[in-house]
Image (spheres, helix red, strand yellow):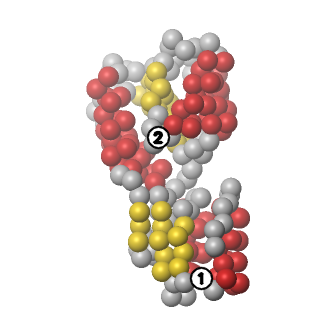
Amino acid sequence: MLATAGDPAKQVNDIEDMMATRNIDGLVVLPFESEPLTAPVAAVKEAGKFVTVVDRGLSQEGIEDLYVAGDNTAFGRVAGEYFRDNLEPGSKIVVLRGIPTTLDNERVEAFQAALEGSEVEILSMEHGNWNRDDAFTVMQDFLSKYPEINAVWAADDDMAIGVLEAIAAAGREDEMWVIGGAG
C-alpha cells in the first residue's frame, strides 16, 4: 500500500489506518515532521512490524530498524564553510530552514558550527518548510526587515527558488547571493 500526505496529521491517520485495516508487515516512512510521527511509528514498531525511516528522522532515536538518509551534517557544514571562506567579516546573512525535523536540525547545527569565529552575523532564521511559496513569503519579510543582507542560505533548492523570486520582486538582485542545495 502507498499513501502520500501533505501534512503530519494526514500522515499519522494513514499510518493508523494501515495498522488497523491493512495488516501490514512493515512500514517505510518519510516523516513529514519528526515530532508528530514519532509516537505513531513507535506504535508500528511495538506491534512487531519492520520499520524503515527515510530522510527525516524521528524525534526519538532507535525506534526504526533501518534509517536511510543523506549526510545532512555535511550538507550544513559545507554551506557554512563556504560562507565563512567567501564572506567578509561582519557580513550579514539570513537562513531559511526546512520543516521542523531532525534532518533540518542536523543541517542548521552544522552550518552554525562552521560559521563559529567567522564574524559572519546571522540576522535571522525562519522555517521556509522546504516550500517555494513559503520561502518567498519568509524572504519578503527578511527583505522588509533588514536593509542590508549580504547572503542567504536556503537549506533546500525549492526554497532557494522562492528566495530568488522575492529578491527579484524587491529589485535587490545585486545586493546578495543565495546558496541552496539538496538537488
Give the residue at the far front of this rendering. 1
Q: Earlier in the sequence, mark 1 or mark 2?
A: 1
**Residue, disc 1:** 24
Kind of residue sitting beneath label 1: Ile
**Residue 86 on image: x %, y %:** 32, 22
Q: Image height check: is 22 above or below 90?
A: below
Q: Quadrant of the N terminus?
A: bottom right
Residue at 60% over, 45% down: 129
Based on the displayed image, in which of its 4 quarters is residue 171 positioned?
Answer: top right
Q: Using the image, determine if residue 159 lies above or below residue 69.
A: above
In the image: residue 95, left or right of residue 85: right
What label does residue 154 carry, if any? none
Residue at mark 1 to residue at mark 2: CA–CA distance: 32 Å
Q: Secondary structure at mark 1?
A: loop
Residue 23 in the figure: left or right of residue 157: right
Q: Residue at x 40, y 21 (%)?
A: 91
- To which residue does mark 2 refer? 183
Place of residue 16 in the rendered image (x, y in percent of width and height, measured from the top left): 67, 77
* Camera sees residue 2: yes
Image quadrant assignment for residue 36: bottom right
Asked if residue 138 can be seen in this view, the reply is: no
Count of numbered badges drawn on the protein: 2
- Residue 24 is situated, as x and y percent measured from the top left of the image, at 59, 82
Q: At label 2, which amino acid type do we have?
A: Gly
Image point (37%, 36%), residue name? 79
